[in-house]
């Protein structure tokens, strides 16, 4: 099954002769995710002078197989025309823009954008075309980060190789300048999963500089160890050293602060 939501969603309107797609309401999470790889063919208002018209704020994403998926009535749109989008990328947030009377997603498929060649989106998603049905999506694991006192969103974004905008969207933040200690932020998918830095072959210790250190810093962060406010800076200073020692101690290694072969194996 494909899903534009994470978690449960409800089908509030079926596709039929007068309704070209499905209306869906996210029950746990309002973020909208691309259901297929493709290129953004439109992103913006259907009519910038009348925000209650048609799909309101929407985007369409064309896949190589001809399917062009429309995501309508968004409250925020995270993509722009011409952009390549991969499946399950967060593309926006469910909303109530356009001709809509309550927050929902209108999702529709037109072959190459031709409104006379609509496809049954329920078949594409692998769900029933049934009003009222609640669809349970196998919950994809969501990576989270708990905000520490003094954190800024830009520092968190830098640490997790994402952007303020994406963090704002994924978490539906009203004001990115107002985050607070203890707040749990969702991290956009595909971050914090694969270490983007090559695994070092040399030991890392206090004062080591370079991508080798970034590998260790990324791995430490990914395992929940704070490495200080500088984030992944490629410098093994006091904060990174302390994180290595805490990690070593937690996994039963001697806490010597030297990230050698054994420590790297545990960090992998
Ligand atoms: Zn609709």
Image (cartoon, rainbow, N blue to C red):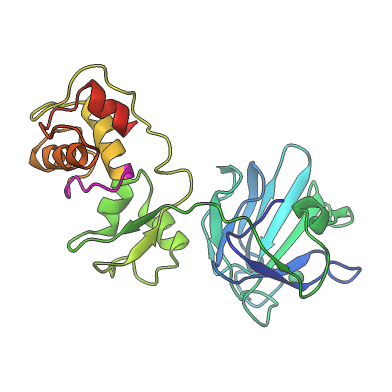
**Front position in the image: 22 or 250:** 250
Task: Give the quadrant of the C terminus.
Answer: top left
On the image, the x and y values in percent for residue 11 come to: 74, 70
Q: In this rendering, would 164 be left or right of 80?
A: left
Indicate left or right for 85 with 169 as reference. right
Q: Quadrant of residue 252?
A: top left
The magenta stretch spans residue 223: yes
Q: Is residue 215 above or below residue 79?
A: above
| Residue occupying image coordinates x 17% and y 50% | 229
Residue 241 in sight in this render: yes
Outermost residue, bottom side: 101
- In the rendered picture of this protein, how many numbered marks are placed on residues? 0
Q: If the picture is divided into quarters, which one holds ligand 1?
A: bottom right
User: Which quadrant holds residue 199?
Assistant: top left
Q: Is residue 186 magenta?
A: no
Q: Nearer the viewer, residue 52 or 220?
A: 220
Across and down, in percent, residue 232 comes to 24, 39
Above or below for 214 versus 138 = above
> From the viewer's perspective, is 218 left or right of 169?
left
Percent x, y of residue 185:
37, 61
Report the magenta residues as a range.
Answer: 222-229
Residue 86: x and y, percent? 58, 42
The chief SS type of the magenta part is loop
In the displayed structure image, the side of residue 232 where residue 124 appears, left or right: right
Q: In the image, what residue occupies the spot 33% across and 50% down?
A: 157
**Is residue 211 visible to us here?**
no
């Amino acid at each position: 099954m494909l899903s534009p939501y994470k978690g449960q969603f409800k089908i509030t309107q079926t596709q039929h002769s007068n309704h070209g797609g499905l209306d869906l309401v996210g029950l746990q999470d309002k973020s909208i995710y691309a259901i297929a790889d493709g290129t953004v063919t439109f992103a913006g208002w259907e009519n910038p002078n009348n925000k209650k018209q048609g799909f309101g704020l929407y985007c369409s994403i064309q896949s190589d197989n001809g399917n062009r998926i429309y995501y309508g009535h968004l409250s925020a749109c995270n993509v722009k025309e011409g952009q390549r989008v991969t499946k399950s990328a967060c593309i926006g947030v469910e909303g109530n823009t356009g001709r809509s009377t309550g927050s929902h997603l209108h999702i529709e498929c037109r072959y190459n954008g031709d409104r006379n060649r609509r496809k049954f989106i329920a078949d594409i998603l692998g769900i029933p075309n049934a009003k009222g049905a609640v669809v349970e999506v196998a919950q994809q694991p969501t990576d989270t980060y708990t905000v520490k006192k003094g954190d800024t969103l830009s520092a968190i974004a830098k640490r997790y190789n994402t952007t303020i905008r994406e963090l704002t969207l994924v978490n539906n933040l009203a004001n990115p300048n107002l985050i607070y200690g203890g707040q749990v932020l969702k991290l956009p998918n595909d971050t914090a999963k694969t270490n983007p830095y090559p695994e070092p072959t040399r030991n890392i210790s206090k004062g080591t500089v370079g991508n080798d250190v970034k590998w260790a810093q990324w791995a430490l962060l990914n395992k929940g160890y704070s490495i200080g406010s500088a984030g992944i800076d490629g410098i093994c200073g006091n904060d990174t050293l302390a994180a290595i020692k805490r990690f070593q101690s937690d996994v039963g290694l001697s806490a010597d602060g030297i990230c050698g072969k054994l420590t790297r194996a545990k960090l992998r």
